[in-house]
Amino acid sequence: MKKNILIFIFLFLCSCSVNIKKYSDNSLIINSLEEIEKSNKSNLITYLSKYPAYIEFGFNNQNCIKTKRNYKNEILIPQSAINSPTLVESEIVKGIYHYKVETKFNLNHMTYEQLLLSWYEKMEYILYNSKIDSIKEDKFLRDDILDKFCAYILSPYTFEKLILDESQKKDLLCNYPLNDLNYYKEYYLSLKDSLTSVTGDDFYNKIYENYIERVKRGEMTKEEAEKKYYYLLSEPIQHLYREQRVEILENLSSILKFEKFYKKEIKKFRENAVNWKDLKNQFPECLKTNP
């Protein structure tokens, strides 16, 4: 009887364990995932077990993280992280968190707020799981995060401004939108209002303007935008109304749910950041930064 109980416990523990190797073929990424699983961010690995994604280094040394949601969810992390194990781990944390928010709230647009939260998650991972001396001695880590690290420990608002400025610069490279959450909320609210007079030009003009913006950001080609737009024009009015109403309400619902989550999450991240303000005395470089 005792033997059977032990076997049951063993099988139960095996069933609860996560098979890290199925998330990547890269040994460096696999090792990093194992380290993350032992850290205070292990919940991200648990999320992967429920909503699997494949993790790999990005192409052409793109200094960004992005997700591709197609037949296979993928999380790409920058090649520039490869020389620092801590940097690889923190980039994976940032990427999984970004993917978690995107899939949990079914977001169809990447926003500044989503990017900002994932950066906070990355900084917390580094600070809670690295010794201060290790951060000082890791040249590749310091080269990548020092400006953000200093902004983070000086003031959450300094940190957030820096992330916004950098995300705007990298917009074309990484396909991150320049727009914030409020932009998309207002956009779908206006679409909802204009849909009541779908026979007029207002609805089509808003759709067209949005497609042009997405082309400029590199999210779709001009040909793809034209194809989607002409498809809308060719749709019977009643069918278009029903189809667009469902899509608009779904997007609006996702955005409003994420907005509620964001307000709670950013409050928590800001409060946690304040706890590290005394670190500036250990990093003379940070004292030169204006908060």
Image (cartoon, helix red, strand yellow):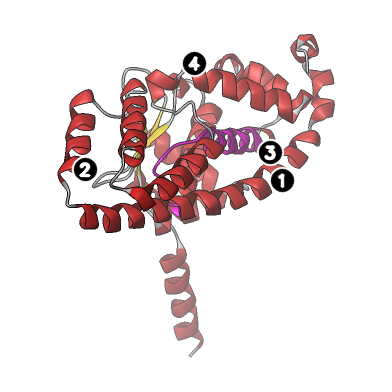
Name the disc covering residue 127, or none.
none
The residue labelled by disc 1 is 268
Hey, what amino acid is under mark 3? Tyr
Q: Splitting the image into 4 quarters, where does residue 287 fall?
A: top right
Q: Where is residue 285 in the image (x, y as percent from the top left)?
A: 75, 11
Farthest residue in the bottom direction? 1
Q: Residue at x 61, y 52 (%)?
A: 260
Residue type (three-letter) at the residue carrying disc 2: Leu
Q: Residue under circle 2? A: 232
Residue placed under numbered mark 3 in the picture: 128
Q: Is mark 2 on a helix, strand or loop?
A: helix
Q: Residue at x 75, y 26 (%)?
A: 153
Q: Quadrant of the C terminus?
A: top right
**Mark earlier in primary sequence (1, 3):** 3
Identify which amino acid the numbered label 4 is placed on: Lys
Q: Give residue 276's position: percent from left, percent from top.
A: 79, 32
- Closer mark to the observer between disc 4 and disc 3: 4
Q: Residues in magenta?
A: 104-126
Quick check: 132 above or below 270? above
